[in-house]
Image (cartoon, rainbow, N blue to C red):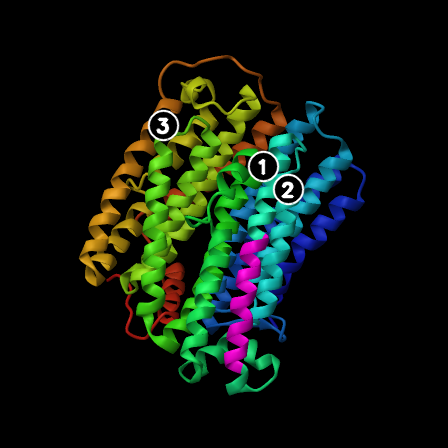
């Protein structure tokens, strides 16, 4: 039994319920800081165990292989820095009288349960329980998106839950079709729902049923991933959520939905070959890139700007998995670097919102001089998200372009053209916000807010710079194992 894996999933539940039960602000903050450290340590330990043993489990309930451990690292790290950030951000809201102690504790309860649901979803061997966990994360996310109870926030929350409910229903149809096909081979038992068993018998599954199941799963989980044209909930949800939740949506929730798509793809590839799933994924990935590049041009809301950037980068990662080969390595690497950079961007955006109480791009200039922490966060994250060295997103985009060129050169040309457009528009907006003369004075932030939010920004920037152009040896082992999941003939970069 892997106790770090059990702790990783259970710790947010205990911290969330504890935050709801205690009646003191300091006690809530201590619980959340303890959770942040636990998430980071447990995710690292799980990854280490998977590197050493190939996979780890907690009975028949939890199981982690290389792909699960990769998501554990992403959710654990960003969840850790996001928890620190939430303590500072929501604490500032409370200090200003916008939150009561009861609402403060409710936020952290929902936030922690949301993290736990995502961690449960990515550490499941059972395809049905994975669906249940991701559906659970949908419910917690909807409550958090509408947490401010403003008209716009409630509308965004309803839009999210309605579209996500449709998407998750389609994903359920895909799950049922996979079970329908597998129970003819494995019998009517829980074994017919286990990923490892599905991989082994994939060649015996009904190709027609698996094709239809993948289409349902791609559209269903693609809705949660913000893939165009199912992306319409995403800009509103990111713009109206409390900023700690905006960061978690972009960095973690979208990545979890991609994880679910990849699990279905691995079965589909073994049953009908990689061409079928690859073409569908590449098509939606390029459409997502095109939609985001166009909308980045016209944004006047800085949180919506980063929301459309999330659509772009999920499209880039999916393109890598769609073309296969070297693109799989690049796609997985892209997911991690995007999570770090995008959460950093939202951390900076949240500080700007606290100071100015608006989200207008046109009214925000000179952040590096007026708000050094927020300005640095947005500038560093913006440069990374634009795909410039020395950050890992540059490396992953190069690897994906090479993988696409090996598979289909024409895809590469479209990819690079759309990437160039997104690069110019995002970088222009980011430089306009961070450089130049400071604008309006705004409201100064409290000491506790500055301490916790600066810690979150610093942790993410150090991580972005550390992994930069070099994949650490332990992470390289995980990436190589992920590549093997998608076919024996695939390779990593040399």
Above or below for 126 versus 98: below
* Mark 2 lies on residue: 144
Question: What element does badge 2 sit on?
Answer: helix
Asked if residue 420 shows in the view, the reply is: yes
Q: Which residues are magenta?
A: 165-182
Position of the N terminus by quadrant: bottom right
User: What's the CA distance linking mark 3 and mark 1?
Assistant: 21 Å
Counting from the top left corner in percent of width and height, residue 309 is at 40, 40
Seen at 62% across and 75% down, the residue is: 60
Q: Earlier in the sequence, mark 2 or mark 3?
A: 2
Q: Earlier in the sequence, mark 1 or mark 2?
A: 2
Question: What element does badge 3 sit on?
Answer: helix
Q: Are marks 1 and 2 in contact (CB under 8 Å)?
A: yes
Q: Dot 1: few (<14), some (14–19), or many (≥20) neighbours within 10 Å?
A: many
Q: Dot 2: few (<14), some (14–19), or many (≥20) neighbours within 10 Å?
A: many
Counting from the top left corner in percent of width and height, residue 323 is at 29, 61
Q: Left or right: 145 with respect to 326? A: right
Q: Are marks 2 and 3 in contact (CB under 8 Å)?
A: no
Q: Left or right: 145 with respect to 385? A: right
Q: Dot 3: few (<14), some (14–19), or many (≥20) neighbours within 10 Å?
A: some
Question: What element does badge 1 sit on?
Answer: loop
* Mark 3 lies on residue: 429
* Mark 1 lies on residue: 241
Counting from the top left corner in percent of width and height, residue 35 is at 64, 49
Seen at 40% across and 18% down, the residue is: 366
Q: Earlier in the sequence, mark 3 or mark 1?
A: 1
Of residue 145 and residue 113, the one placed in the foreground of this image is 145
What secondary structure do most residues of the magenta stretch adopt?
helix
Q: Does the magenta segment cover residue 467? A: no
């Amino acid at each position: 039994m892997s106790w770090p894996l059990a702790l990783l999933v259970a710790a947010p539940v205990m911290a969330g319920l504890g935050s709801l039960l205690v009646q003191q602000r300091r006690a809530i903050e201590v619980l959340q800081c303890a959770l942040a450290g636990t998430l980071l340590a447990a995710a690292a330990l799980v990854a280490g165990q998977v590197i050493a043993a190939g996979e780890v489990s907690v009975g028949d309930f939890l199981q982690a292989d290389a792909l699960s451990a990769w998501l554990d690292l992403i959710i654990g790290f960003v969840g850790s820095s996001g928890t620190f950030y939430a303590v500072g951000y929501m604490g500032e809201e409370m200090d200003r009288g916008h939150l009561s102690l009861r609402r403060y504790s409710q936020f952290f309860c929902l936030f922690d349960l949301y993290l736990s649901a995502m961690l449960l979803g990515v550490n499941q061997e059972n395809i049905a329980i994975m669906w249940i966990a991701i559906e659970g994360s949908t419910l917690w996310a909807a409550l958090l998106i509408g947490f401010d109870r403003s008209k716009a926030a409630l509308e965004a929350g309803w839009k999210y839950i309605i579209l996500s409910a449709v998407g998750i229903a389609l994903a359920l149809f895909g799950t049922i079709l996979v079970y329908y096909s597998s129970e003819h081979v494995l019998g009517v038992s829980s074994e017919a729902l286990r990923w490892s068993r599905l991989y082994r018998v994939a060649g015996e599954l009904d190709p027609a049923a698996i094709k239809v199941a993948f289409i349902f799963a791609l559209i269903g989980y693609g809705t949660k991933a913000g893939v165009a044209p199912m992306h319409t909930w995403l800009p509103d949800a990111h713009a109206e959520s409390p900023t700690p939740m905006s960061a978690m949506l972009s960095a973690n929730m979208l990545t979890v939905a991609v994880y679910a798509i990849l699990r279905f793809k691995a079965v589909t590839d073994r049953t009908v070959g990689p061409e079928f799933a690859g073409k569908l994924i590449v098509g939606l990935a390029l459409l997502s890139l095109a939609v985001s590049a166009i909308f980045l041009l016209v944004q006047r809301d800085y949180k919506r700007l980063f929301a459309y950037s999330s659509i772009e980068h999920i499209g880039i990662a999916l393109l890598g998995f769609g073309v296969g080969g070297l693109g799989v390595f690049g796609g997985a690497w892209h997911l991690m670097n995007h999570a770090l950079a995008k959460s950093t961007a939202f951390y900076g955006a949240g500080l700007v919102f606290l100071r100015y109480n608006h989200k207008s791009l046109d009214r925000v200039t000179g952040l590096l001089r007026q708000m050094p922490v927020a300005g640095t966060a947005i500038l560093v994250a913006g440069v990374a998200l634009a795909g410039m060295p020395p950050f890992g997103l540059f490396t992953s985009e190069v690897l994906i372009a090479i993988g696409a060129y090996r598979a289909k050169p024409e895809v590469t040309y479209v990819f690079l053209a759309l990437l160039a457009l997104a690069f110019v528009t995002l970088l222009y907006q980011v430089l306009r916000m961070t450089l130049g003369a400071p604008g309006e004075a705004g409201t100064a932030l409290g000491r506790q807010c500055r301490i916790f939010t600066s810690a979150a920004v610093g942790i993410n920037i150090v991580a972005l710079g550390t992994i930069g152009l070099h994949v650490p040896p332990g992470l390289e082992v995980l990436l190589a194992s992920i590549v093997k999941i998608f076919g024996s003939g695939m390779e990593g970069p040399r």
